[in-house]
Image (tube, rainbow, N blue to C red):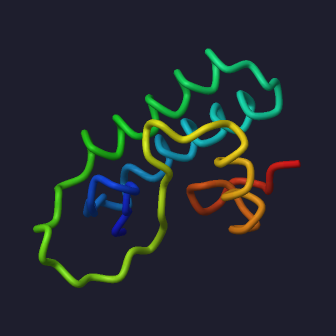
Amino acid sequence: MIMRVMGEGQFQVADDHLNRLNELDEELLRALESGDEEHFRTALDGLLAAVKTFGSPLPDDSLEPSDLILPDAEATIDEVRRLLRAEGDGLIPGIPEYG
């Protein structure tokens, strides 16, 4: 699966890592629901770090379509909430829609 982190590029992530990424996505959803900025920041940072750890970066000139797009590390709670509503699902496929 190809995941784009806004402002950072694309990462090829093997499907066998999706369960862990889904767990991190669920944590991010809980942080959004609580409205706790520190919890949100920790959860978003954890999800993005996992994508970079599990994924292999694609070259900057690669024209591969992204399977999903993740916000950058500086995204606000409100920006991520809007992204989730636009996507109609969690950030990672298989997670229920936020609020």
Q: Position of residue 48 (x, y in %)?
A: 40, 40
In this view, the residue farthest toward the top is 38
Observer-nearest of 15 and 26: 26
Residue 99 x/y as whole percent:
89, 48
Q: Position of residue 33 (x, y in %)?
A: 82, 32
Residue 29 horizontal side relative to residue 33, left or right: left
At which x and y percent is residue 22? 56, 46
| In this picture, residue 2 sits left or right of residue 44 | left
Residue at image x 73%, y 48%? 81
In the rendered image, the vertical position of residue 68 relative to residue 82, given as above or below: below
Q: Is residue 74 left or right of residue 63?
A: right
Rendered position, 32 above or below 87: above
Whether residue 26 sits left or right of residue 33 in the image: it is left
Residue at 27% over, 44% down: 52
Residue 57: quarter of image: bottom left
Q: Residue at 65% across / 60% down in the picture? A: 94
Which quadrant of the structure image shows residue 6? bottom left
Q: Residue at x 56, y 56 (%)?
A: 92
Q: 79 and 2: which one is in front?
A: 79
